[in-house]
Image (spheres, rainbow, N blue to C red):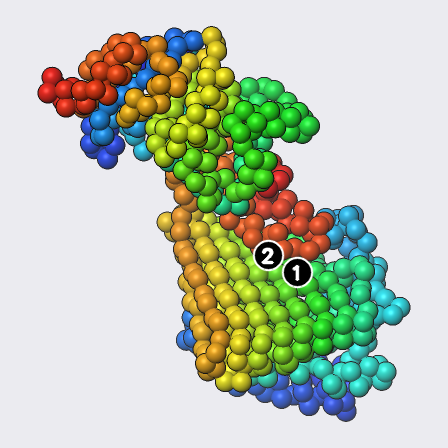
C-alpha cells in the first residue's frame, strides 16, 4: 500500500526527515511514536503533499506509484487521507457542504458521476451515527468554534465519508477526553479493513489501547530508530523517550 | 476642447431644448455654475485621493446621444432578471426604450423622469423632492443635476407593497465613439410601503462609456426599500454612482452593491436620517482583477436618536486591481443611542493588488454604540491545504473560500432569483462550475 524509501525532507532550509524507510501493507495498522520535534507531523504532511515541505531525497509510493508530482488533491483522489492534528476552521462553509464538495470532486477525478443528493444524505446520516455526531453539528461552519474533541471526531467523520485506502491519523488523541477517544477509536476500528491501511502518529501509548497496531515504529531525529510489535509502545510508555535518546 | 468646456457650452444647447421658464431651470443653472467653479474632482481632493478620472476624461465624449439606437431583447435578455416578472425601466444610450420597458401607472408610478419633470400633474412632487437630498456642492452631482432630463421616476403610495421587483437598466450600444450618460432617478416610497429595486449599467461593446448617475431616494415613515446595484460591466465602462437617501422615522433602507467589473467604478452612497428608529443597511461585494478600480465612499449621517446603521463590505482583489473603502459615520449631538456598525474585510490575491481602507467616525453624541472593523489579508494557506487534502482542487478550494468570505453579504439578498444570479456571476468570475450550496 505505502512504501517510503530513504525519505529526506526539509522546511525553510531546516532538515527534518533524514532517511525514512517504511512499508505498510493493506490490512495493517502502524503506529509511529516519538518525542516532540522528531519529525512525526512533517512525515504526515509530506505524505499528504503539503507544499511547504521540500522533499530533497527519496520517495513516497502509494500502490507502487511515486507521489512526488501529485498535488494534495490528486493524492486525496488516489485514496490518501490525513487526519489533521490541528483541523483548520473554515467560516461560511458547512460540514455537510464541505463533504459534498470533497466527495463529488473526488468522484469526478475518478471518472464517476456526482453522488445523488438522497444517497449523499443517507451516507452522511450513517457515518455521523458511527461517530455519534449530532445532526445540528453538520450544518455548522466547518471546525468553527468546535471543541478539540469535536474537531477530531469531525476528522474521523470525514475519513468515514471519503473511505481512503491510506489514512494517516496525526495526533488524533490530543485534546480528547476518554469518551471522545473511545468514540473516535471505535469509528477508526469500524473503518479498518483488509483493503486499507492506517498509520497512527502519536506521542502517547493511550490511543493504542483502543486502536491496536500491528507494528510500532519510533521516530527520532528524522529517522526510524526502532521498530517492533505493539509491546514496543508499552516499553516506551514505561521507560519514556529518554531511553531512545540515550541509545541514539 | 476639454470635456469641462465642452459640457459648459453644451449646457447652452441643452437650454434650447428644455423649458427655461420652469423652476427647474434655476436648479439646473445653479448646478452648472457649481460645476463650472469646481470642475471635475482631482486627486488633490481628500475624497478623490485614490481615484483618478483623468484618463477617462481624456475621451471625446458625446454629450447628447442619438435617440434611435435599438437593440433586440434576445441580445440583452441575460442582463434582466428574466426568471421572474418585473417592472422594467430601460434606457438605451440614455434614451428611454419603450420596447424593452414594462412601466406602470396602475396604483404605483414606475415610469420616466422626463415625464415627471415636464408634466403638470407631477409638478408638486417634483417641487417637493427633486434635488432635495442630492448634494448641491459636489461637482459631479451638480453636473448631473444641470443636465437632469431622463431616468426612472418611481413613486409608491402609502401602504403599497409592490409585488414585483423594479429593474432600472441603462444600456449603452457603443454607436458613439465615446459616450457620457447621466441618468437621474427619483424614488419616493410612501408611508408603510415596500419596494425592491435592481439597478444595472451595461455597455454592449468596447467603446468607452462614462456614466455619471444620480439617484435620490425618499423613504417615508415605516417604508421598506431594498435596493440592489449590479456593477458587472466591461473594461471600457466607467461609472460614478451618486446615491442620496433620506429616511423618515422607522423606515428601513438597504443598499447592496455588487462590483464585479468595469474600468473605474466610484460609488458615493449617502444616507441621511430624518426621524427616530431608522435602520440603514449598506453592504457590498467587490471582486475584481486586471487593472480595474472600485471605490466605495459611504456616508451615514446620524442626525436623530435611536437609529441603527449596518455596513458590511467585502473585497477580493486580484492582479493589479485597486480598491478603496472610505466609510464615514457622522453622529450628530442629538443622535443619542445611535447604534452604528461598520465592517470592511479585504483579501488581496496578488502582490500587485492594492486596497486603501479608511474608516472615518465623527461622533458628537455621548451615548452611542459605534464600532468598525477593517481587515486586509491573503488567502489562508492552511485552509487551502486542508481543503486540497480532502480532494478539493486548488481552484475550487480557492473559490469556495472566496464565496464563504462573501457569504455574509450574499445571504442577505432578499430576492432568491437575484441571489442565484449573483452566485452564478461569482462562480464565473472565479472560473469554477459550482453551485456554492453552502
Chain hosting mark 2: B
| B373 vs B349: above or below | below
Task: Determine which residue is flagged by label 1.
Answer: B228
Disc 1, SS:
strand
Q: Where does residue B408 sit, x and y in percent of width and height?
A: 56, 53
Q: Residue at x 19, y 23 (%)?
A: A240
Residue A39 rendering spot, x and y as whole percentages: 25, 26
Q: Chain of mark 1?
A: B
Instruction: State the residue position of label 2.
Output: B258
Please name the residue shown 43% across and 25% down the image: A182
In this image, B54 relative to A224: left or right? right
Q: Residue furthest right?
A: B106
Say whether residue A81 is left or right of residue A232: right
Instruction: State the separation of the CA atoms marked 1 and 2.
Output: 8 Å
Circles 1 and 2: CB atoms closer than 8 Å: yes
The residue nearer to you, when weighing B241 against B258, is B258
Seen in the picture, residue B176 relative to B305 is either above or below; the reply is above
Quarter in which the N terminus of chain A is drawn: top left
Residue A144, can we see it? yes
Tell which circle, 1 or 2, labels the residue nearer the N-terminal end: 1
Amino acid at each position: 500500500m505505502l512504501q517510503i524509501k530513504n525519505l529526506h525532507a526539509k522546511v525553510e532550509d531546516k532538515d527534518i526527515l533524514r532517511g525514512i524507510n517504511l512499508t505498510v501493507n493493506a490490512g495493517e495498522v502502524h503506529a509511529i511514536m516519538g518525542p516532540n520535534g522528531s519529525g512525526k507531523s512533517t512525515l504526515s504532511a509530506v505524505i499528504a503533499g503539503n507544499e511547504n515541505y521540500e522533499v530533497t531525497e527519496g520517495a513516497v509510493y502509494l500502490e507502487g506509484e511515486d507521489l512526488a508530482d501529485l498535488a494534495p488533491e490528486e493524492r486525496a483522489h488516489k485514496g490518501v487521507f490525513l487526519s489533521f492534528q490541528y483541523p483548520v476552521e473554515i467560516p461560511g462553509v458547512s460540514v455537510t457542504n464541505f463533504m459534498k464538495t470533497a466527495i463529488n470532486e473526488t468522484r469526478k477525478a475518478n471518472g464517476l458521476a456526482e453522488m445523488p443528493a438522497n444517497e449523499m444524505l443517507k451516507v452522511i446520516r450513517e457515518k455521523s451515527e458511527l461517530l455519534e455526531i449530532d445532526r445540528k453539528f453538520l450544518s455548522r461552519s466547518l471546525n468553527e468554534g468546535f471543541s478539540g474533541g469535536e474537531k477530531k471526531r469531525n476528522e474521523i467523520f470525514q475519513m468515514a465519508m471519503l473511505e481512503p485506502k491510506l489514512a494517516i491519523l496525526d495526533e488524533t488523541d490530543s485534546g480528547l477526553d476518554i469518551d471522545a477517544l473511545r468514540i473516535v477509536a471505535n469509528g477508526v476500528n469500524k473503518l479498518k479493513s483488509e483493503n486499507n491501511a492506517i498509520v497512527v502518529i502519536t506521542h502517547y501509548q493511550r490511543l493504542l489501547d483502543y486502536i491496536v497496531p500491528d507494528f510500532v515504529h519510533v521516530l527520532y531525529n528524522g529517522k526510524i530508530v526502532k521498530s517492533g510489535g505493539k509491546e514496543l509502545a508499552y516499553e516506551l510508555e514505561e521507560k519514556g523517550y529518554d531511553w531512545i535518546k540515550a541509545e541514539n | 476642447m476639454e470635456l469641462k468646456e465642452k459640457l459648459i457650452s453644451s449646457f447652452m444647447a441643452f437650454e434650447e431644448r428644455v423649458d427655461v421658464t420652469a423652476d427647474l431651470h434655476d436648479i439646473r443653472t445653479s448646478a452648472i455654475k457649481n460645476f463650472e467653479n469646481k470642475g471635475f474632482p482631482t486627486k488633490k481632493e481628500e475624497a478623490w485621493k485614490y481615484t483618478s478620472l483623468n484618463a477617462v476624461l481624456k475621451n471625446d465624449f458625446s454629450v447628447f446621444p442619438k435617440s434611435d439606437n435599438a437593440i433586440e431583447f434576445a441580445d440583452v435578455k441575460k442582463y434582466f432578471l428574466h426568471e421572474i416578472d418585473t417592472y422594467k425601466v430601460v434606457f438605451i444610450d440614455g434614451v428611454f426604450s419603450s420596447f424593452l420597458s414594462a412601466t406602470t401607472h396602475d396604483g404605483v408610478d414606475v415610469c420616466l423622469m422626463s415625464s415627471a419633470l415636464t408634466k403638470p400633474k407631477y409638478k408638486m412632487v417634483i417641487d417637493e423632492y427633486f434635488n432635495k437630498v442630492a448634494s448641491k456642492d459636489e461637482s459631479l452631482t451638480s453636473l448631473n443635476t444641470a443636465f437632469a432630463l431622463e431616468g426612472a421616476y418611481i413613486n409608491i403610495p402609502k401602504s403599497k407593497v409592490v409585488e414585483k421587483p423594479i429593474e432600472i437598466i441603462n444600456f449603452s450600444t457603443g454607436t458613439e465613439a465615446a459616450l457620457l450618460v447621466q441618468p437621474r432617478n427619483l424614488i419616493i416610497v410612501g408611508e408603510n410601503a415596500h419596494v425592491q429595486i435592481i439597478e444595472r449599467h451595461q455597455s454592449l461593446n468596447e467603446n468607452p462609456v462614462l456614466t455619471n448617475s444620480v439617484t435620490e431616494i425618499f423613504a417615508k415613515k415605516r417604508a421598506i426599500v431594498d435596493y440592489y446595484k449590479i456593477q458587472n460591466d466591461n473594461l471600457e465602462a466607467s461609472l460614478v454612482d451618486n446615491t442620496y437617501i433620506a429616511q423618515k422615522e422607522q423606515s428601513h433602507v438597504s443598499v447592496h452593491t455588487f462590483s464585479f467589473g468595469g474600468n473605474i467604478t466610484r460609488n458615493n452612497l449617502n444616507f441621511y436620517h430624518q426621524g427616530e428608529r431608522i435602520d440603514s443597511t449598506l453592504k457590498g461585494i467587490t471582486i475584481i482583477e486586471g487593472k480595474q478600480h472600485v471605490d466605495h465612499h459611504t456616508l451615514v449621517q446620524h442626525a436623530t436618536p435611536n437609529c441603527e446603521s449596518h455596513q458590511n463590505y467585502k473585497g477580493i482583489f486580484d492582479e493589479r486591481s485597486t480598491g478603496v473603502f472610505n466609510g464615514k459615520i457622522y453622529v450628530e449631538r442629538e443622535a443619542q443611542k445611535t447604534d452604528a456598525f461598520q465592517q470592511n474585510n479585504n483579501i488581496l490575491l496578488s502582490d500587485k493588488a492594492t486596497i486603501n481602507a479608511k474608516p472615518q467616525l465623527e461622533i458628537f453624541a455621548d451615548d452611542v454604540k459605534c464600532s468598525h472593523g477593517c481587515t486586509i489579508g491573503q488567502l489562508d494557506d492552511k485552509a487551502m491545504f486542508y481543503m486540497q487534502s480532502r480532494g478539493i482542487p486548488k481552484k475550487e478550494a480557492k473559490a469556495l473560500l472566496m464565496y464563504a468570505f462573501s457569504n455574509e453579504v450574499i445571504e442577505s439578498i432578499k430576492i432568491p432569483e437575484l441571489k442565484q444570479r449573483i452566485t452564478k456571476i461569482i462562480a464565473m468570475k472565479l472560473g469554477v462550475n459550482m453551485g456554492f450550496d453552502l
